[in-house]
Image: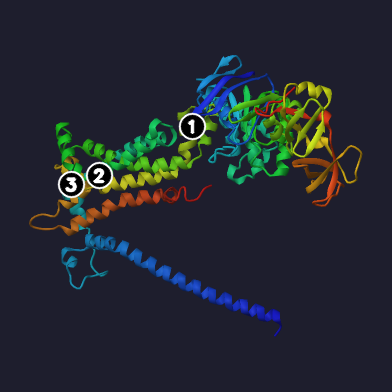
Amino acid sequence: MTAQTRQAKLSNQNGASSMRQSRRARLVIYITLILAVVAALAPVYWMLTISLKSEVDQFASPPRWLLFSPTLAHYAEAFVSRSFGQYLATSATVAVLSTICSVTLGTFAAYGLARFRMPAKLNRRLSLWILSTRMFPPIVSAVPLFMMMRDLRLLNTMAALVIVYTAFNLPFVVWMMRGFFQELPRELEEAAMVDGDSRLGALFRIILPLVVPGLAATAVFCLIMSWNEFLLALVLTQTDAAMTLPVGIAGRVTQYEIKWGVMSAAGVVAMLPILIFAMAVQRYLVRGLSLGAVKG
Amino acid sequence: MKVKFDNVTKRFGNRAVVDRLSLAIDEGEFVVLLGPSGCGKTTTLRMLAGLEDVTAGDILIGDVRVNEVPPQHRDIAMVFQSYALYPHMTVAENIAYPLRVRKITKDEIRRRVRRVAEMLEIQSYLSNRPRELSGGERQRVALARAIVREPRVYLMDEPLSNLDARLRVQMRGELKRLQHDLGTTTVYVTHDQAEAMTLAHRVAVLSSGQLQQFDTPMNIYHRPANRFVAEFVGTPGMNFIEGRVDHRTGTFSGRGVVLSLNDPQLQRLKGRERATLGIRSEHVQVAAAERDGWLRAVVYVTELMGNETLCFLQLGDEKIIARASADFRAEMETSVWTRLDMDKADFFDAESGEALR
C-alpha cells in the first residue's frame, strides 16, 4: 500500500466518523424539535378535536384520539344561536384599529427618539420612561382605567378597548421600532435631504421602506396582544355590544355547566385570523426579528 | 457659485470642533479641506450641507446667508464616504431620486439618468441594486446621483477612501477631469494629502478646528505657513532641526550639527536666538564617499521606494530623512556624507511654529 492510498483511506475514515457524528447530532436536534412541536401543538389538537366531538365523545375514557364521528353542532351553536360571530367582529375591529394606532404613533415616536439629539440625555431618559410603563402588571391599572372610562362614558364601547390597547402596545412599538431605526445609517436620510427631500419625505421614501420587515413583526405582535387580551376587556366591557372573543369564550364557563364544545369551536375560529396573518407576513417576520443580527 | 465661511464656529458641548473658520471659495473652484482625523474638516462640510447647525458665524452660498436654510433648499449635492446609496432602489432609481423629489417629468428624468450613466460608464448595471455592485461601481453611482442634478456646489466627504489603491488613483484622475468639465464649485474633504495636492485648485489645511493655511498646492508644499503644515504635507514630511542662531558667526546649531546661514536668512532671523529649521528631504543630498564641505552622518535605515531611496540619517544628534536615487545603497550604521541645501531651508518660530519670512 503506498503512502498516498493510506493517506486517502485515513482521511476517508475520518470523514466517515465525522459524518456519523454529525448525523447523530442531527438526530438529537430533530427529536428535540419534534418534542417541541408536539408540546406546542397538543393543546391545539385537543381544542380542535373537542370542537368536533359530540359531548359523549369528549368525555370518553380512554380518550378517542382520532376515531369519533365529527359534528359541527358546536360551531353552529357558537356562531348561529349564540353571538360569537359578533364577538369575533368586535375582536377583529379592536385589534386592527389599536394595532394601526399604536404602530403609527409608536413609529413616529421611535423615529424621533432614534434620530433627534435632545438636551440633557432626554432621548435615553424618555425611552426608559416609556419602557417603564410596561413594568407594572396590567391589573394595577384595571380599576383606574375602569373609573376613567366610566367618567368618559366609554364603558362597553370598542373605543375604550382601542384606546387602552393602543396605550399598552405603544411602549412595545416604540422600543422595537427605535431599534430598527438605529440600525439604519443616518447618512441615508442625510443623503435624501441633500438630494432635495424633506425629512418627512426621506422618512416615507427611504427609511420606512427599509424597516418594513420590522414594521411587520411589530404589527403582528401588537395584533396578537390585542387579540388575546382578556383582563382589561373583561373589566371594561360587560355587554354584547363590545365584548371580545376571549371574554365571550370565558363566559361559557357558568355556574351549572362548562360548554367545552362551544368554547373550543370559538377558540379554533379565534386562532385562524392570527394564523393567516402571520403566514402572510412570515417572510417579513423572520427578517424583522433577525434584523440587526445580520448587516447588509 | 461662490461659497464663504465667515468666522464660523461649531461647538459640541464646550469643545470647539471648528474654531472661527474663515474661507472664501471662488466660483468654479475645487477646494480640498485637508487635515488629520478630528480636525473638523467633515464637520465644516456638514455645516455647509446643512446637516449640522452653526454655533456662530455665517455661511454664504452665492451671496445668500444659508445658516438656517435646510439641506433640501441649499441646492447642493453631496457624495458620502459610505456612498449612502438607497439599498431598496435600483441604480437607476438611486440616480433619479434627486430629480424625482423635485417633481421633474418622467421623460426628462429618464433622459438625464441615461446621460449621466453614459458619462460615468455605468449604463450596464442601471437595473441592479447597490448591494450587487463592487466598491468602485458604487462610488460611480454615488457620483452619478450627485451630478445628475447640476447643483450649485458639490460636497464630497472622503469619497475615495473606501476604494483600493489602484482604483483610487484612477478615480482621482476622473474626478479632476469631471470637475473641470462641469466647472461647478466643489468642496472636497480628505485626510490624504496626495488627493489634496492632485485635485485642488486651493487646499485648506485644518488642525484642531483651526485653519492653518489656505493656498495653492504649490504654496502649501513649498511655502508652508507653519510647522504643522510643513510636517503634515509631503511624504515624508519636512525635516526639522531645533536650534540656536549665532549672529556673530552666522551659523545655526542644532544638537551636534552646525550649519552656516546666508545673509537673507540672517536678516529673517534677526533678533532671534532660537528657531526651528525646516528642510524637505529632496533638499538633503547624500553620498557614499566623502566630499568637501559635506557633513558626516550615520545611516539609521534605508527604504527603497522603487523610484528613489529614503535614507533615515543620524546627523549629530538630529534625525533627518534624505532622498537619494533608487540605486543608492548604504548599510545600517555605516557613515555617509550629506549636504543640506540651505538656500531651500525654511525657518519657523521656536514656540509658535509660525513660518519666518
Q: Is residue B83 left or right of residue A257?
A: right
Marks 1/2: CA distance? Answer: 35 Å
Amino acid type at circle 2 is Ser
Q: Decide: is A264 above or below B356.
A: below
Question: Which is in the foreground here, disc 2 or disc 3?
Answer: 2
Q: Chain of mark 1?
A: A
- Where does the image place residue A208, in percent across and percent down from the top left? 45, 37
Q: Which residue is mark 1?
A: A202
Q: Residue at x 65, y 40 (%)?
A: B161
Q: Which residue is mark 3?
A: A83
> Which quadrant would the C terminus of chain B be assigned to in this image?
top right
Sequence-earlier tag: 1 or 2: 2
Q: Which residue is mark 2?
A: A91
- Check whether the beta carbons of the residues at disc 1 and disc 3 lie within 8 A of each other: no
Q: Residue at x 68, y 36 (%)?
A: B192
Q: Residue furthest front?
A: B248
Amino acid type at circle 1 is Ala
Q: Can the viewer see residue B129? A: no
Q: Secondary structure at mark 3?
A: loop
- Using the image as rendered, state which of residue B278 and residue B229 is in the foreground: B278
